Amino acid sequence: MTETSLFENAHIVLRDSEFQGWIAVDGGLIVDMGEGRAPERGLDCRGDILAPGFVELHTDHLESHLRPRPKVDWPARMSIVAYDAQMVASGITTVFDSVRVGNDADYVAARNDASNLVGEIAAAADEGVLRARHRTHLRCEICAEDAVEAAADVINAYQVDLMSLMDHTPGARQFASIEAWKTYYGGKSGLPETHLQKLMDRKRELFAKNYTRHRAALVAMAHNGGVAIASHDDTNSGHVEESIADRVSLAEFPTSVLAARLSHEAGISVLMGAPNVVRGGSHSGNVAAEALAREGLLDILSSDYVPASLLMGAFGLAQRIKGYGLPRAIRTISYNPARAANIHDRGEIAIGQAADLVRIINQDKGPIVREVYRDGVRVF
Ligand SMILES: [Fe+2]
C-alpha cells in the first residue's frame, strides 16, 4: 500500500490549536505542515477536519464479536478481524484490546482463554491482516479465585502494556447501589432474584478472602514486568490512596468527583466512558463524565462498549462546554491516552510524529469518520 504524501485544504487540529492548511507525510511520519495553500497538489480534504488517530485504552467491544449471543462462540480470528475493522472505522488507530482474566459472575473462561486470545491477536498482527496497532490491556477481576494465575499465564507468554485492577463486589465502587448491581448482573446473567442473593453473598466472601493478597500479587507482577497499572471504579479517598501507593498511572471510571479530583491532582490520568458523555450520564448511576470535564478533571475518554462513541463524546464536550474547544476535546482521545500509556511516537499532529490521521466531516447529526490513515497509509 502506498502512503498519501500531502493532505491539503484541511481543518487541522493540533494539540493546542487549529488552522486551515496542509500536512506533508514521508516515510510514515509527519514531516511538514503549513497554513493556507499547499506548496504542491495533494489529497484535497475539502475543508474537512484532520485529527490525530485516536488511541483507545479500554474497549470491551471484542467480546461482543467473540460471543455475539449468550453461549455462541464465534471463530477467534474472524472476530478479531471484524473488531479491528470497526476500530479503524471509528477513527481508532491504536487500540488496547481488553482481555479479561478472573472468572466472574457474568464471565466464565477457561484458564488459557486469555492467553489464546492475546496470541491470536499477535499472530493476526504479525501476518499483516490488522489495520489498527494493537496493544494488550489485561483486565484483572481481583477477587476471582483464579485471577493471579490467569494473569501470570498471559504476562509470562506475551507483551502486556496495561493492567487494570477491578473489583465488582456488590455494595462498593461501580455498584455502591445494590439495586444497580442487581440490574446489571441480573440482566447479563438472567439469574432469578434468589440466585442473585446467593451470588452476592459469594462475591462478598471472595472479597474478604482474596482482595488484599491478590491485589498485592497483581501489583507486584505489573511492576516486575514494567506494565502500567490502571485503577478501576475508585470511589472514595481510601481507594485513591491505595492507587497512589500502588503507583497507578491511570484511573478508569472513578465514580465520584472526589475520587476523580484526588486522582487527577496526584498525576493519575482520569479516564471516563465516552458513552457516558453521549448519554448524558452513567448507566450505573455514578458521576457524569461531562461534569468532570467541566471541573477540568477529565483527561481521557474511552469508547468502552460503543466504538463510535469516542468521536461523538469528544465532539460533545467541545460543543456543550463553553470555552472547551476542539483541540482540548480531541486531546482526550489521542494525546492524553497515548502519553498515559507511555506511547510517545504518535497521538498528536506534530512534525516527527507518526502520520496516524482521521479525516472527519461534521454534520448536524454528529461527526462522521470519512477516512483513516495509519503511518500515512489509508486503512479506512
Ligand atoms: Fe467496573
Image (cartoon, rainbow, N blue to C red):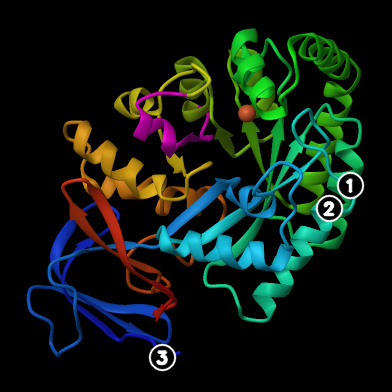
Q: Is residue 136 magenta?
A: no
Marks 2 and 1, how far apart in space?
5 Å
* Circles 1 and 3 in contact, beta carbons < 8 Å: no
**Could you tell whether 127 is left or right of 88 in the image?**
right
Q: Return the residue at label 3.
A: 2
User: Tag 3's secondary structure?
Assistant: loop
Residue 215 appearing in the image: yes
Q: Which mark is residue 113?
A: 2
- The amino acid marked with disc number 1 is Ala
User: Tag 2's secondary structure?
Assistant: helix
* x and y percentages locating residue 64 in the rendered image: 62, 48
Disc with the residue nearer the chain's start (2 vs 3): 3
Disc with the residue nearer the chain's start (1 vs 3): 3
Residue 344 appearing in the image: no
**Quadrant where the image shows the C terminus:** bottom left
- The amino acid marked with disc number 3 is Thr
Quadrant of the displayed image that contains ligand 1: top right
- The amino acid marked with disc number 2 is Asp
Q: Is residue 278 magenta?
A: yes
* x and y percentages locating residue 303 in the rendered image: 47, 44
Q: Is residue 237 above or below residue 220?
A: above
First to last magenta residue range: 266-282
Residue at 81% x, 49% y is: 224
User: Tag 1's secondary structure?
Assistant: loop
Q: Return the residue at label 1.
A: 110
